[in-house]
Image: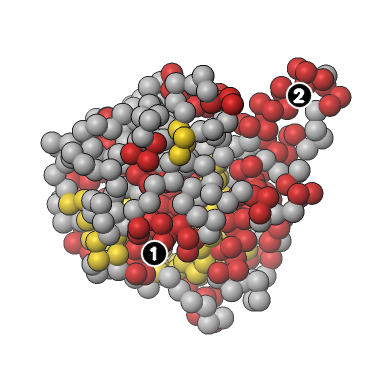
Amino acid sequence: MSRPDVVVTGLGATTPLGGDVASTWEAMLAGRSGVRALTHEWAAELPVRIAAELVVEPAEKLDRVKLRRLDRSEAIALIAAREAWADAGLAEAPPEPERLGVSFGTGIGGATTLLAQDDLMERSGPRRVSPHTVPMLMPNGPAAWIGIDLGAQAGVHSMASACATGAEAIALGLDLIRSGRADVVVAGGTEAVIHPLPIAGFASMRAMSTRNDEPERASRPWDKARDGFVLGEGAGALILERADHAAARGARVYCRLAGAGLTSDGYDIVQPHPEGRGVIRAINMAIADADIARSDVTHVNAHATSTPVGDMAEIVALRAALGDHPVVTATKSMTGHLLGAAGALESIATVLAIRDGVVPPTINLDDPDDALDLDVAAHKPRHMEIPAALNNAFGFGGHNVVLVFTRA
């Protein structure tokens, strides 16, 4: 029995670059940075005082009564999912609830709720803790709220694989449709943990950039002066749909989600394998799953977070698996690192790159690493034909996810 084709019919996002997909994509192509100095009082004593915060607050999209029951990560997941749902035209022609699934994850989840409620309990006692605390902090909350909002009854699934989460959720969505369990899946990721504790924790690991005086220049993948990632927040959602289901309702199709490869390094809790063995296997698996030639892959949206070790480990793997022909970019140079949402937002960028025939730029690549031997779209967009593109996403714990998108 042949596998059904799976296509992307809707996109939704709220990010440090824009409050929706269109404004985010416009900012990416313009090479704008979403990284800013943190002006909160709590940031004053931190070693890292920069981050990529949302440009549109959830309160501008959701009513305040609803917001009181939602962690910030849940709220922005719901905003992204609703945009994708409307973009796909499903508000007018919804699928059968039993054929609608959700695959949506978060790397850290409701940490800000947990910390805020703990502070409240310390100050005022346990009776003041909100009755909504547990549903707000549980990591399946974003997926559950999307499922409730849209009436999904084919299963609601929640990934938690660190910075590979959003991409792994999309890979699961692909499997749900291929297996016949769903016709439509809302897939993606969310994260909102710009808070002193996570920042202090990452800073103690020396994982974050300390370029506090030049926030817009702090995220600089593959540059010799890179000194760590910049924390961002946001959410991205994709509507995945069985191709014949989309055709039957006359849906607009962005592209095809053709394949996925998932591996694990089995090496270290935070460091990637220095030879990129797990990444190479994931790329090979994804290309085989998509049943395409390596030469079809002309673009890669890299994981590239701006860390000294991780950036070049990925380049080693890309070179080994694909040679030197793809044009590579790192959109985290503009958005910062959205952790559990990164793979979802960068999948959206990959989908739009295929649709528009343009690779968004990598900004701040002023002095490339001597070992950077691939073609990077630096400083400005690259207009080109893209029959197939990869999105890479890797996470602490050795999670490797590679997605293949092709023209429909």
**Residue found 84% across the figure and 26% down from its top:** 128
- Give the SS element for disc 2: helix
Colour scheme of the picture: secondary structure
Query: Which quarter of the rendered picture does the C terminus lie within?
Result: bottom left
Disc 1, disc 2: CB below 8 Å? no
Q: Is residue 192 left or right of residue 8?
A: right
Closest to the camera, between mark 1 and mark 2, is 2
Query: Label 2 is placed on what type of residue?
Result: Leu
Q: Is residue 331 above or below residue 222?
A: below
- Which residue, given by chain and number where applicable, does mark 2 sit on? 120
Residue 282 position, x and y percent, is 32, 46
Query: Residue at position x 73%, y 34% from top?
Result: 134
Report the front residue among 107 and 180.
107
SS assignment at label 1? helix
Neighbor class of circle 1 (other Cα within 10 Å; few <14, some 14-19, many 20+) is many
Report how far apart the C-alphas of labels 1 and 2 lie in the structure. Answer: 43 Å
Query: Could you tell me the amino acid type at mark 1?
Result: Leu
Q: At 24% from the left edge and 39% from the top edge, which residue is drawn? A: 222
Tell me if residue 222 can be seen.
yes
Q: Position of residue 217 (x, y in %)?
A: 33, 39
Estimate how packed mark 2 is, as few (under 14), some (14 to 19) or many (20 or more) residues with alpha carbons within 10 Å. Answer: some
Which residue is at a point 51% across and 19% down the rendered structure image?
45
Residue 166 in view of the camera: no
Q: Is residue 166 left or right of residue 256?
A: right
Q: Which residue is mark 1?
A: 352
Q: Return the x and y of residue 329 as percentages of the image width and height.
A: 28, 51
Q: How many marks?
A: 2
The N terminus is located in which quarter? bottom left
Residue 211 on image: x %, y %: 36, 29
What's the mark number on residue 148? none
N-term mark: 1 or 2: 2
Who is closer to the viewer here, 218 or 315?
218
